[in-house]
Amino acid sequence: MTQTAPTAIPVPTVRRRGSLAQAAYALPVVLLAVMVLIYIVSPSFYLTYVLEKEHRETQAVEILTFLCGLTASGLLAWSAWRLWRLEWHAGKVAGLPGGPMLVAVVALAAIFFTGEEISWGQTYLQWQTPEAYEELADNGETNLHNAKTPIRVQSLGSLFLVVVFMGLPLAWRFRDRLKLPADWRSGVAEGPVVFTFVCGFLWSRSKELYLRLNAPEDAAQSELYVQFISQMKEQKELLFAVGLLLYGLYRVRQVREHRTASLAGER
């Protein structure tokens, strides 16, 4: 009886994946380095085109944040649907597949994040805040993350990101010991995604460190703080949007791998 040797993964494919992973790991560091470099070389250019408090809604950082979040939302919604069909309708998973469900939840979170970034269209369409919401709105912005509510939406969002993009990948490394369901696999974030979110959180903490090392009145007089450090939250949100985009791209790859495996199994 002739046995068929297992198909080896082509070496160029492995190298290509390694190169793409390295580029994905480098992306958040490069983005931060570029912003720092632009500010050092030309503060006026940075404040005019990249990021400045009063005009940030129409500048590069906010626009890139919106575009990355919007693209991620579409990729994740499509991937959740395709993964659901491949894992559940194909009968590969008994019950509801956890991975696609997690991807669907992150897709909803990405849609919410993107909508909040542009105040659900108010930033570009310039419509007035509804009268019923005026008491909650901060500076006339119709969103929840800046609203004067007892529930801190930003804190809840940060907790969600920590659990999904740091806690779950860490737990997955010990999945056998923790007895995590195997069908969660397609929703677990990859290393570059985790690294991007870690960079975002650490970068925003540097602002807090600066304020601890300098008195508030001194910070208020510092050009570096007023022009650059005070807006690190917006830079952090850009990294979060990039992290969501990377997560979406990896989910698309998961769909392709599932499809390839399904075709191979039919032969």
Image (cartoon, rainbow, N blue to C red):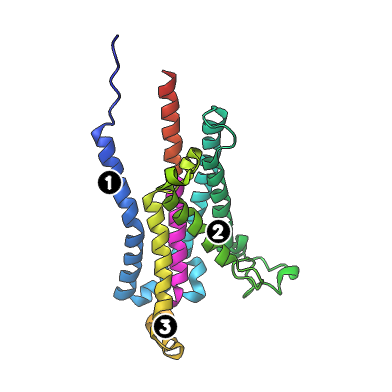
* Neighbours of disc 1 within 10 Å: few (<14), some (14-19), many (20+): few
Q: CA distance from mark 2 to mark 1?
A: 30 Å
Q: Is residue 16 magenta?
A: no
Name above or below for residue 175 compared with residue 63.
above
**Which part of the image, by quadrant, shows the N terminus?**
top left
Please tell me whether mark 2 or mark 3 is closer to you in this view: 3
Q: For mark 3, what is the residue? A: 212
Q: Residues within 10 Å of mark 2 (few under 14, many from 20)?
A: many
Q: Amino acid at mark 2?
A: Phe
Residue 120: tell me if it is visible.
yes
**Residue 109 position within the rendered picture, expressed as x and y whole percent measured from the top left:** 56, 54
Horizontal side of 146 relative to 166 (left or right) equals: right
Check disc 1 and report its element: helix, strand or loop: helix
Q: Earlier in the sequence, mark 2 or mark 1?
A: 1
What's under tag 1, amino acid-wise?
Ser
Q: Is residue 241 magenta?
A: yes
| Mark 3 vs mark 1, CA separation in Å | 39 Å
Which is nearer the N-term, disc 3 or disc 1?
1
Image position, residue 49 (x, y; %):
41, 69
Q: Classify residue 73 as left or right of residue 173.
A: right
SS assignment at label 2:
helix
Q: What number is the disc on residue 19? A: 1
- Asked which quadrant contains residue 238, the reply is bottom left
Asked whether the beta carbons under mark 3 and mark 1 sit within 8 Å of each other, the answer is no
- Residue furthest right in the image: 132
**Dominant secondary structure, magenta:** helix
Task: Give the residue drawn at x 44%, y 19%.
Answer: 266
The x, y position of residue 132, in whole percent, is 75, 69
Q: Nearer the viewer, residue 75 or 89?
A: 89
